[in-house]
Image: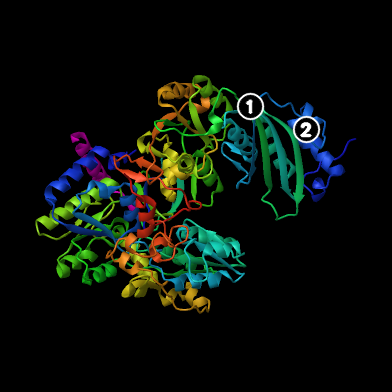
């Protein structure tokens, strides 16, 4: 049995922290991570306190729940109103507020909303409830998209007529381009380890080629992240941006070709609206016409009002790492994890939520 | 996003398998890891194995961190 | 008078008539029967102790009704016994009110009642009064139980004042998160399977041993819903002080850790049903710890932190990495996540 505990060893963390301080020699640097799980890990382990103050860690748009537009939630809520429909969703989406309420509040009003931990559970529900329509809410990046693709394939194989997916899947490399084109100076990216497990490291090479910015594909344990930061600092000091892979135990440079094939078989890239960031071309995944019978957006004719951001909300700037959460006038009041107003607070791993839970009040 | 945990494959039936770690078991989809065999470690996300763990690389990474820890 | 035993609970069982009496005779009295209860008066007449009384109530709803390590009946007795015990009271008498769903198999009810009887005996309490109502199918999840409890305050203790003091040591009596994860595994809806057993257990024996070891236990809490983090926040908040704990010291079983990681849960927020947290004067901490470890249910007790002067945040934790983070109050139930 492999023992993974050394990935959290305090002594090694200090060694890495010292190495980072030593080679950074006080030079200001700003690194961005684009994965909610990284946001959480950094906050949960207090990693910022191990870094020299000149090194700033910024959270980008890495929380797929946070960047899902209101219109999608409202679409799901409209579907939930139909008595023949069972909405199946990951827990992450349950409390997200759209303009018409949340899935949780819809459930308390009688809508059939069920939490699942896998698309396979949603499929099983469709098989055991032939007289009901099961709609699965497909949210997530390239890590999750293949699991939905697998479900679509299985649904077709089993000739199910009562299963469909409402997709809001998004893909990673495009927003990195948008962020790099922005005025904010980012000295390097902590690249998402599990998205990269699927897509490999090649899709990030444009960061070096076009923007002279490096990135390190990073695992999620605290030592993984610290090691990745060390490598990013080293790249900056040596003026040698590159795409490195720290997460070699999981990420191969070519990624997971079987998973990529699954995605290509059922999805095509499409323009997608990122809450707080606006429209990013080619950054979403839409279901291909061969699988239109399983596309809930096609199957059910629903119209919803266009998404509108709440007044005063500065999520867009938070998601781009331009401001820290407390700089938003709504942060803490009225926007809190219990009563989220904007995208960054809605998910427990959103930038503002992570800040609020782990950093809100002073520690000393 | 992308909560995923390494677990060991202890049963396999075509594209369905059972993985285990720390005494906890889960049934998972193996569509993304063709060629996986019993005893392999796989990374589990949302009820699917999304990649095989490269054991050699894992042990190397662990050894690296352990060495650092011993230094401290 | 003989009768054919019913197989399922019917609305009439809650009606107060013949069928209600049959349910009492067939299910409740054989298990709970004692002098007070058997009188079947509208109220039980009890002897008041010499000092103060502790009085508590809780209602129990759990899905599934049966889980590894116990069932709703064990929760119903232990939960109330423990709420009395942590206030420094010797639990004595319980009431038990049942709301049953029409159609519930009588066998199921009997199994729950049997467990309640066994647990009450183990805890040294009597169930002296009760009630049963039946609601139509669909209006209850099988069984809902309410228990209220009375205990006599041990006059040696000031635990009932429940006030942390600066400099106190924080102890926890056993491994965290077992109950919550046992129930989740038993639900099977989240895909995980494990051998995790609920930690549900009466803690009054443990408390007695602790109080024998020291009169300087300043506060105790039963860590239930919301887990360790919730009771620590409540205790710190009430006293206006700050609690700092060490992650490395928290007793958590491997299976619970793995199950939590799989679902994106934090074990410090997961429910317990047989774990207490105590704030003890520094000079007596070792003695109390030793006493706890001498009782089965406290065998894995640990010192996990200390109480300091109040600052901005109520509860903080030194992570295994040596850094610090806030342990906030939970907002709502933890939901499994994939992100």
Magenta stretch, overall SS: helix
Residue C115 coordinates in the image, percent (x, y)? 66, 34
Disc 2 marks which residue?
C44
Whether C326 is drawn above or below C288: the answer is below
Left-right relation of C207 to B5: right
On the rendered image, what quadrant is the N terminus of chain A found in?
Answer: top left
Q: Nearer the viewer, residue C12 or C274?
A: C274
Residue closest to the far right: C1
Residue C323 coordinates in the image, percent (x, y)? 29, 42
Of pointers 2 and 1, the one earlier in the residue sequence:
2
Q: Is mark 1 on a helix, strand or loop?
A: helix
Task: Tell me, for residue C122, which label it has, or none.
Answer: 1
Chain part drawn in magenta: B50-72
Q: How many labels does the image show?
A: 2
Q: Which of C188 and C153 is in front in this view?
A: C153
Q: Which of A332 and C327 is in front in this view?
A: A332
User: Callout 2 environment at 10 Å: few (<14), some (14 to 19), or many (20+)?
Assistant: some
Whether B52 is drawn above or below C131: the answer is below
Subunit of label 2: C
């Amino acid at each position: 049995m492999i023992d993974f505990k050394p990935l959290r060893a305090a002594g090694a963390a200090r060694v890495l922290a010292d190495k980072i301080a030593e080679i950074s020699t006080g030079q200001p640097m700003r690194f961005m991570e684009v994965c909610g799980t990284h946001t959480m890990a950094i906050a949960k382990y207090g990693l910022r306190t191990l870094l020299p103050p000149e090194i700033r860690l910024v959270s980008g748009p890495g929380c797929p729940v946070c960047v899902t537009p209101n219109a999608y939630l409202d679409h799901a809520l409209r579907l939930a109103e139909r008595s023949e429909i069972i909405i199946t969703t990951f827990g992450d989406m349950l409390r997200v507020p759209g303009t018409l309420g949340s899935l949780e509040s819809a459930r308390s009003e009688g809508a059939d909303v069920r939490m699942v931990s896998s698309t396979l559970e949603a499929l099983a529900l469709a098989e055991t409830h032939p007289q009901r329509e099961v709609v699965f809410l497909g949210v997530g990046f390239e890590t999750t998209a293949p699991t939905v693709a697998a479900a679509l394939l299985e649904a077709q194989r089993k000739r199910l007529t009562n299963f469909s997916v409402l997709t809001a899947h998004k893909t990673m490399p495009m927003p990195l381009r948008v962020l790099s084109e922005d005025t904010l100076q980012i000295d390097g990216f902590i690249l998402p380890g599990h998205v990269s497990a699927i897509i490999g490291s090649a899709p990030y090479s444009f960061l070096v080629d076009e923007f002279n910015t490096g990135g390190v594909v990073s695992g999620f344990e605290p030592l993984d992240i610290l090691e990745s930061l060390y490598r990013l600092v080293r790249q900056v000091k040596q003026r040698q941006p590159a795409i490195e892979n720290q997460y070699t135990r999981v990420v191969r440079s070519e990624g997971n070709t079987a998973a990529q094939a699954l995605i290509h078989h059922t999805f095509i890239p499409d323009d997608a609206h990122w809450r707080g960031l606006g429209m990013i071309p080619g950054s979403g995944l839409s279901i291909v016409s061969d699988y239109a019978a399983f596309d809930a957006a096609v199957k059910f004719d629903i119209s919803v009002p266009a998404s509108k951001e709440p007044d005063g909300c500065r999520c867009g700037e938070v998601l781009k790492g331009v401001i820290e959460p407390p700089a938003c006038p709504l942060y803490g009041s009225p926007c809190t994890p219990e009563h989220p107003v904007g995208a960054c607070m809605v998910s427990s791993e959103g930038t503002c939520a992570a800040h609020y839970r782990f950093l809100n009040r002073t520690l000393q | 996003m992308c909560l995923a945990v390494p677990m060991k494959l202890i049963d396999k039936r075509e594209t369905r398998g059972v993985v285990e770690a720390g005494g906890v078991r889960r049934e998972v989809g193996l569509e993304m890891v063709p060629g996986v065999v019993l005893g392999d470690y796989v990374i589990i996300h949302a009820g699917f194995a999304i990649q095989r763990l490269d054991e050699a690389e894992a042990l190397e990474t662990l050894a690296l961190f352990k060495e650092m820890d011993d230094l401290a | 008078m003989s009768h054919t035993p019913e197989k399922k609970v019917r609305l009439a069982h809650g009606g107060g008539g013949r069928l209600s009496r049959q349910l009492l005779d067939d299910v409740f009295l054989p298990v709970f029967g004692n002098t007070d209860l058997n009188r079947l008066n509208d109220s039980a007449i009890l002897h008041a102790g010499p000092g103060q009384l502790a009085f508590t109530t809780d209602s129990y709803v759990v899905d599934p009704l049966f889980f590894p390590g116990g069932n709703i009946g064990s929760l119903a007795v232990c939960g109330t016994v423990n709420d009395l015990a942590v206030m420094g009271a010797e639990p004595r008498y319980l009431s038990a009110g049942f709301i049953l769903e029409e159609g519930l198999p009588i066998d199921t009810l009997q199994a729950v009642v049997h467990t309640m009887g066994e647990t009450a005996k183990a805890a040294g309490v009597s169930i002296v009064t009760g009630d049963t109502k039946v609601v139509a199918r669909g209006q209850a999840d099988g069984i809902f139980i309410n228990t209220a409890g009375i205990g006599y305050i041990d006059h040696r203790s000031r635990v009932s004042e429940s006030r942390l003091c600066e400099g106190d040591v924080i102890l926890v009596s056993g491994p965290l998160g077992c109950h919550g994860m046992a129930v989740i595994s038993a639900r099977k809806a989240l895909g995980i399977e494990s051998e995790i057993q609920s930690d549900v257990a009466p803690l009054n024996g443990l408390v007695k041993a602790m109080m024998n070891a020291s009169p300087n236990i300043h506060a105790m809490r039963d860590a239930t819903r919301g887990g360790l983090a919730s009771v620590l926040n409540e205790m710190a908040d009430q006293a206006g002080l700050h609690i700092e704990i060490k992650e490395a010291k928290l007793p958590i079983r491997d299976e619970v850790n793995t199950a939590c990681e799989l679902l994106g849960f934090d074990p410090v927020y997961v429910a317990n049903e047989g774990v207490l947290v105590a704030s003890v004067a520094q000079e007596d901490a070792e003695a109390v710890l030793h006493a706890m470890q001498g009782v089965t249910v406290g065998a894995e007790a640990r010192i996990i932190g200390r109480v300091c002067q109040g600052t901005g945040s109520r509860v903080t934790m030194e992570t295994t990495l040596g850094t610090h983070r806030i342990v906030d109050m939970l907002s709502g139930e933890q939901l499994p996540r994939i992100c």
